[in-house]
Amino acid sequence: MRTALPTTPLRLVCPWVVAVILAFAGLGAARAAEIRNVLVLYANSRLLPANVQYDQGLLETIRTSADRPVALFDEFLDVARFGGQAYTDTVVSYLRTKYASRPPALIVVANEEALSFLVSNRAALFPQAPVVHMSVGRSFLRMNPALSADIVGVPIEYEFSGTIEQALRWHPQARHLVIVTGASVRDRGWEARLRSEVPRFMERASAEFLAGLPTAAVLKRLGELGNDSVVFTTGYFTDGDDRSFTPRESVEAMARAATAPVYGPFNTFIGTGIVGGRMPNYAAMGRQAGEIVNALLDGAAPDSLRLPEIMPTTLNVDWRQVRRWGIDETSIPGDAIVHFREPGLWEEHHKDLIAGAIVFLLQAALIAWLLFERRHRRLAEQANQKQRFELAHASRLAVVGELTGSIAHEINQPLGAILSNADAAELMLESAADRRGELREILADIRRDDLRASEVIHRLRLLLIRQEVERQAFDLNEVVSEMASLLRSEVQRRGFSLDIQTAPTSATLVGDRIQIQQVLINLVLNALDAVADLPEARRTILVSVAVRAGAIAIAVSDRGHGIAPANLPQIFDSFFTTKPQGMGLGLSIARTIVEAHGGRLRAENRPGGGAVFRVEWPVADAKAKPAVEVA
Amino acid sequence: MNMTALIHVVDDDDSLRNALLRLLAAAGFEARGYASAGDFLLQPRPDRPGCLLLDIRLPGPSGLELQAALQEQGVALPVIFLTGYADVSSSVRAMKAGAVDFLAKPVARDTLFDALRRALAVDALQRAARDEARQLRAGFASLTPREREVFDRIVAGRLNKQIAYELAISERTVKAERAQCMAKLQVNSAAELGRLAERLQQLSGDQAEG
């Protein structure tokens, strides 16, 4: 769809430009070429919108230069308002007198009335000058005697039927066609033509003619129409009260009053509030006439010109009315001229939009990249975490492996007791005596031993299963006690004693208690390994829990030989070990776990001999640190 | 003297020890329990046939250490070890040191009773050997110095004449001493006397070794 943009600036500027050129041409005329005058005769008044457009088309097209100066003169016959032989004679005489000193080399007539006027009075009005007509109906030419060969132009044909057809197509619900015409001679001509063309629409709609009525009556009737109506009007020059209008003015009033869509055949109506119609373009007519003028001035013979048979009409439509009447936008053909369409955001700001889109895309790409990176990092972190979790678990398995003997002993003790008790009970039952009291005792013992065995298995299972990392509050005192019962047998086997000093108040930590227990087991086993060859009196390991002003500290101390100063800095490194069968992962994993719980693990030698490993949580971390993501 | 067997059960686990004592009692054994090696050593032990049911893992001195200590003291109670977790090195040590058996807890009744019976049989044999040796020594100790001189020479294969010459006594006296020896040692012939001398020598050799 093409969009007609307002041409106001051009209309203002062009006459001035031409005037200046013409003035210049006038000055140089004596020396260069003779100025050739072109007289344009308009049928109507100067301000008729169609006239303005003809004028604009002519000015755009007619070439003038120092070598070929052309002067344009306009005359407005105003035949719609004035008439009669006396008026005609006066005008003829006036024109003859006025242009005697500047005889026109060519005359342009706009509209049928101007053509009629000139043909009728040609003998008196510069008969040598060829004539170019514009805006003359083909039917008019056909109805009148053939024009002489030096009168040329491209005729037009107003598409009354084409416009009505289009209107009915856009308003499928319309069953009533209202036609408005005026009272002047010309208005009556249009009315006659319409009365001959309308019957062919009678199958689709009924017709109602508002012909030659006073404007007030017309507007009243138009205000009563329902949505099953469409209005077609040519506008009028004179109404039933003999009031004068330009057709555009009359249509403007009608469109404002009508409660149904209004259509018309003239493109000067665009902007008055009509929807549109199939219309010839007046500026195009002006340009076409201008081309003929140029050709003739250049010396072409009028009868040698090859001219189009007719001026084309195009569908013109007012976008605001399309919206108002709910016309399906997709039914507007692609070659229609759409007026007053709000330039879309795209048309008005496409550079900004492109820039915006680019910025947006860049930003989106950046965000996508950042998200990708984040995901990537999170996956890596998860993998890392998983690895640490596996490692911690593997280390627990290793610890349990080390404790196998002690654990088997701890489980087999109660199992052995159970079996022996059961055997004893069986033997008692075989004997004749009533030993119910003893049997009851035996059953109680069996139950107790069973629970004892399952307790060991439960503790072991907690250490062994690969459960997800927990994040719960727990009391470190309990963890220390549990650790002690798990290790009791092993400590005993190695000929040691374990001295446990829990804190009098609860030592709450948030995290995974199994992992913390693992740390403590590691530290105690480490101490056991480190002090294997001590005399009886020093074979003690002390584990103490202290809570001081919210800070928690666990110390695992032995009375062995201490840590060699050279080894102190690296004992927490992975794969550092002083034990022949050690992997060197225990302490490094222990530190990782403690740090993941917001704490600190360090080792030092005690002044009195022996090493001490301290796990410490400062106040804030012990209470508030919720995030323990690491295994 | 009470000659029924007495079984000593040393295990620090009260529950297990009680269960074992209960079972032994129900099976007609007489048994006593001790919570530790020290406990056992401090208790007076009547000289009765019996055996020791010993947990290998004990607080303080372990079962193996107790076994060694008893051997040092010449207490010849057969030992059956019980263990919650049989590792190879300690079982080897135990068997080398003369344990009758090495049983894993939980132990089936029949296995336990079999082991006990074997231990008691071992004990009975040991006791019989010990009684015989004691009798021999008592007989030997009752010989007068002159009788012992004659005995030594008989065992060495000398003839009466040679003995009389060596000891500068009459052949008749040698004969009288010889009859006295055989009566005191309850043998009927010189050959028997020789075997007895061999046995004595064996016993004293064992003692030197132990």
Image (spheres, rainbow, N blue to C red):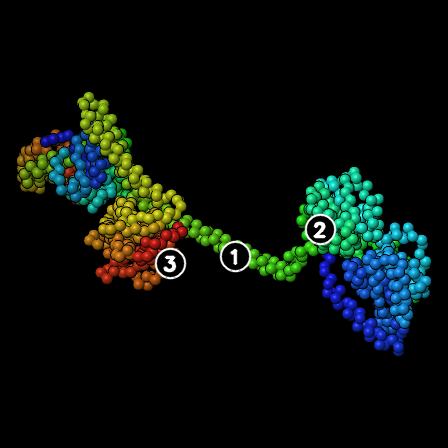
Task: Establish if A79 lies above or below A260.
Answer: below
Q: Nearer the viewer, mark 2 or mark 1?
A: 2
Q: Amino acid at mark 2?
A: Ala
* Quarter of image, res A465: top left
Q: Are marks 3 and 1 on the same chain?
A: yes
Q: Are marks 2 and 1 in contact (CB under 8 Å)?
A: no
The residue shown at (28%, 36%) is A451
Q: State the separation of the CA atoms marked 3 and 1.
A: 34 Å
Question: Tag 3, which chain?
Answer: A
Look at mark 1 in the image and give the residue it sits on: A370
Mark 3 to mark 2 CA distance (whole Å): 93 Å
Q: Is residue A381 visible?
A: yes
Label 3 SS: loop
What amino acid is at disc 3?
Asp
Q: Secondary structure at mark 1?
A: helix
The reply, left or right, for residue A561 in relation to residue A297 is left
Q: Nearer the viewer, residue A329 or A119?
A: A119
Q: Mark 2 = which residue? A: A255
Do the residues at discs 2 and 1 belong to one chain? Answer: yes
Residue B54 is situated, as x and y percent measured from the top left of the image, at 22, 39
A585 vs A483, left or right, is right
Task: Tell me the crowding category of disc 2: few under 14, some 14 to 19, or many 20 or more residues within 10 angstroms, Cα based.
Answer: many
Return the mark for residue A573.
Answer: 3
Q: Earlier in the sequence, mark 3 or mark 1?
A: 1
Residue in the foreground of this view, choosing between A255 and B58: A255
Task: Give the class, few, some or many, for how many residues have Cα within 10 Å of label 1's Cα (few <14, many ≥20).
Answer: few
Q: Name which residue lies at 72% across and 49% down.
A: A216
Chain ID, mark 2: A
Amino acid type at circle 1 is Leu
Residue B161 percent coordinates (x, y) = 9, 37
